[in-house]
Amino acid sequence: MLDTSTPAVTAALVRVDSPSVGGDGVTVLAQRRTVDGRAHGELLAPAIQAVLAEAGAKPADLAAIVAGLGPGPFTGLRVGLVTAAAMAQALAIPAYGVCSLDGIGASLPGVALVATDARRKEVYWAVYDQGVRIIGPAVDRPADVPVLARRSGFALVAGEGARLYPDAFGVPVADEPCYPSPRVLAALAADRIRSGVDGELLRPLYLRRPDAVEPVARVALP
């Protein structure tokens, strides 16, 4: 399981079994998380190696790759998705994508809003009712989000964006989770893993255009 949609560079090795009474059959065997929004490329590969070593596993032991699709800033998110796609192709195993905000919102009680840092003084956000996403994902200024989500009646906000702009939402800010949970992300893909459905094209949820664009060719005037 890989997620680089936030400053938290996350890799985890997860076992997915048949669900049992009182459990979903998802167990985290090893995980690594380092919070550094400027070093996704440098941190992800060592994190993958570390979780495999801790669990005594090899890449050939993997049966599927789960990746957080974002939303997230272009560069960091791209690192995780390219890595996930490359591993899946090299190992001839399926890859499954999950909205990264769901890795926070799916574990929240009641009606809750998740907000992560989108930079440019904006947040990526979504609203959940008993863990099910009912609005979003979207990207907006923090002050605009309560207006856009007012009909949901959210009573709690979680995520890094909530910590950055605690006064913008008008409801209590949850201490945890702040970043997507690898166990929750894997659990959201568990049914697909168990059924062995074909892998998916990992389409990133950028929600806005990247800062860097190709220059427009100059047209010579006659």
Image (tube, rainbow, N blue to C red):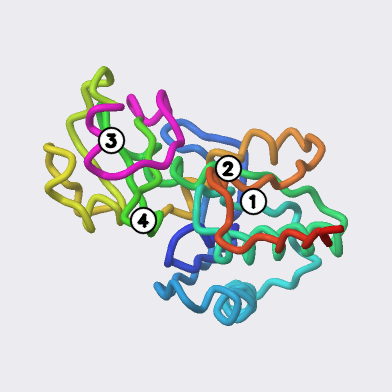
**What residue is disc 3 on?**
145
Distance between the alpha carbons at the discs numbered 3 and 1: 29 Å
In space, the residues marked 1 and 2 are separated at their CA atoms by 7 Å
**The label number, if any, that marks residue 66 in the structure image:** 1
- Callouts 4 and 2 close, C-beta under 8 Å: no
Percent across and percent down for residue 86 are: 79, 63
Query: What's under tag 3, amino acid-wise?
Result: Val
As displayed, is residue 211 above or below residue 111?
below
Relative vertical location of residue 133 with respect to residue 124 in this rendering, above or below: above
Of label 3 and label 4, which has the lower sequence position?
Answer: 4
* Discs 4/1, front: 4
Question: Tag 4: residue type?
Answer: Asp
Tag of residue 98: 2
3 falls in the magenta region: no
Q: Splitting the image into 4 quarters, where does residue 168 fall? A: top left
Where residue 56 sits, quadrant-wise, is bottom right
Q: Secondary structure at mark 1?
A: strand
Label 2 neighbour load within 10 Å: few <14, some 14-19, many 20+:
many
Residue interval drawn in magenta: 128-148
208 or 138, nearer to the observer = 208
Residue drawn at x 64%, y 77% as measured from the top left: 45
Q: Amino acid at mark 1?
A: Val
Measuring from the top left, give residue 94's x and y in whole percent: 79, 48
> Which is closer to the viewer, label 3 or label 1?
3
